Amino acid sequence: MSVTKKGILNKLYIVFVFIALFLVAIIVRLTNIQFADGEKYRNLSEQLTLRNDTIYANRGNVFSADGSLLATSMSQYEIRMDVVTVDSKVLEKEIKNLSTELSKMLGNSVSYWETKIRKARNSKNRYLFISRKLGYNDYMKIKSFPIFNLGMYKGGFIAEQSTVRAHPLGKVAERIIGYDDYRGAPGIEGAYRSHLKGTPGWRMKQKIAKGLWKPINDTNEKEPIDGKDIVTTIDVNIQDIAHHSLLRQLEHYNAEHGCVVVMETATGEIKAISNLGRSSQGKYYEKRNYAIYESHEPGSAFKVMSLVAALESGKIDTSTIVDTGKGKYKMHGRYINDSHRGGYGKISAARALEVSSNIGFARLIDENFSEKPEEFIDILKNMHLNDKLGLTIKGEGKPNIPSPGDKIWSKNALPSIAYGYNLTLTPLQMLTFYNAIANNGEMVKPKFVKEIRSWDEKVAYFGKEVIDSQICSKNTISKVQEVLKNVVIKGTGHKLYDKNFSMAGKTGTARTEYGNYEKWVKDKRYISSFTGYFPAENPKYSCIVVIHKPDIKIGFYGADVSGPVFKDIAQKIYTSNYIINTIKNTTPNFASVNNSFDSYFTKSNTEFISIPNVKGMAAMDAIPLLENIGLNVNFQGEGKVKEQSISVGEKLIKGATIVLKLI
């Protein structure tokens, strides 16, 4: 018995020793963790339970010259449902009511929604898709639906917010306004991204449960700084006129693409720019920034530059006679043709421009500069025709005027350049030169942005930037101005003449894609243009219209295809509320803009159950308001709402179509 008791005690002693050693090891390890590795594990703990949450800054807005909103950031919501978290009694009691409300708001039948939710419950779906791209009003509405109004943990309501860039004008001027995303950074949004994006802040948060974090402090560790606002030179009314006038002509001539730019003569401010290309479905949209990037042979529109250079050299005058013969002339082994059958015979240099004689200009330039062609080329380049404009907007095309000695130079190069071939320019580069003619020789840089603002504070102002105070002599300018007036009165642009208002400019018709001449003869393709300014005396605006590859069965001459767009724009500006005889370079009254916006914002956040009254509202305000409450909007005309097809006060039916008549 005593032996057994002693054996048991020995075993207990051994166990005790092991336990004691184990406790000592634990104490040593804890001491080591506390003092030797304490900092390491504290940092690891903080990494697992603490984090810095980025607080993204609000991106700045883009405004038109009068303060109208062109681009802004808006919240949109994707709604999902954690069906598992909803109490079974609550679900059975309210599922019918929830399905009814979802049916009213999102469409589909009540049974569709009830079946969808029940299937999700059976399959334990904790992330059931309900809807996406909801605006704030719809988000607040759906949040109040039965079951959803119980919140995330009891009602399974999940709302994921994202911010999207919205253009209140829709697709109008989309390319020049631009965007800043995975597609790159074109337009104003890209050029001024550093000003628009702001500076993000951050806030320390602590993990309190799986997937749940709470702020540690009441304030942010670093407050975000909102982006600055950009005030552009765009005039929304002129932009609307230019866009729709170009669109109508592209559709009529079934053209591939086209662009139009309207510039304020004295300042270089771009008042409108539209770039429309045809989709594979035959619809036109803001496809590429053709006016800025696309270099092409200008054709007859370049004859103005040739005339200026020739007059500046002193070798000819507008009265110099040139023999154009019977409309076909062989020069350096190649025939040059005029469009007029039978030719023009002997005419003055001025008349050669008025009737756009290829032979006339080829002979005038070749016969006066063939011995020293660099003299002619140098004059062109001294007028900055071979220089990029240095725009802040990305993607400007490079002009190319060859010089003697270049690989592409030949005996035919000089006469070809004289009437607009063998060189390339972008539409905006062409317009900048014509604008200098209208501006009595002062060449100003095209300007898209007037100022940068932070709230009511002006951060930066961009005034007129002069490229060249005098591109040529005053005498040459006055002579060319007179000839350009006559182009419209009695030249190739005579169909555009209107006694009620004056215009000056030059038609342009250029062959394109003619490298394989035999193929081109079977499928002729042209670029039609009209470049000029108005009024002819004391011009206020210059404008270029370029249309690529119109259907030649309908027409292809610049006067027929592009000229009417120019005239339509000029005519509508004349007959609008613009005072054509004065130009006011004013800064937008942001106090009034803010008041107008507050009024619109209040109205747009009203919960409508009937059709609102939008008569008298600008289209750019009325259309998004009606679309946000679930209506499809069609409109006729431009400007403000005169009539609406659904009467005020009628019951609101989502998905219905309302037609607005604008004036």
Image: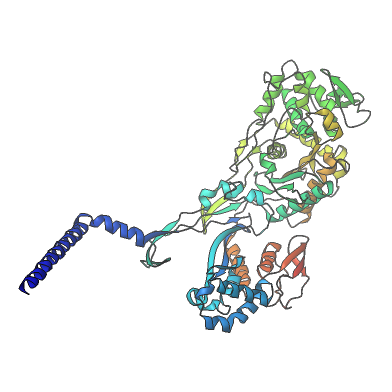
Closest to the observer: 278 or 107?
107
Percent x, y of residue 525: 82, 36
Percent x, y of residue 92: 57, 82
Closest to the observer: 453 or 574?
453
Percent x, y of residue 63: 61, 56
Please identify the quarter of the rendering in which residue 374 is found.
top right
Percent x, y of residue 391: 60, 40
Q: Is residue 580 visible?
A: no
Above or below for 135 versus 386: below
What is the residue that sits farthest to the right in this orientation?
A: 342
Please identify the quarter of the rendering in which residue 240 is found.
bottom right
Q: Quadrant of the C terminus?
A: bottom right
Q: Residue, x 78% and y 40% (percent of image)?
A: 529
Image position of 127 (left or right of 268): left
Above or below for 419 versus 237: above
Q: Residue, x 60% and y 38% (percent of image)?
A: 390
Please identify the quarter of the rendering in which residue 424 is found.
top right
Q: Quadrant of the N terminus?
A: bottom left
Closest to the observer: 431 or 190?
190
Above or below for 427 versus 111: above
What is the residue that sits farthest to the left in this orientation?
A: 2
Closest to the observer: 598 or 285?
285
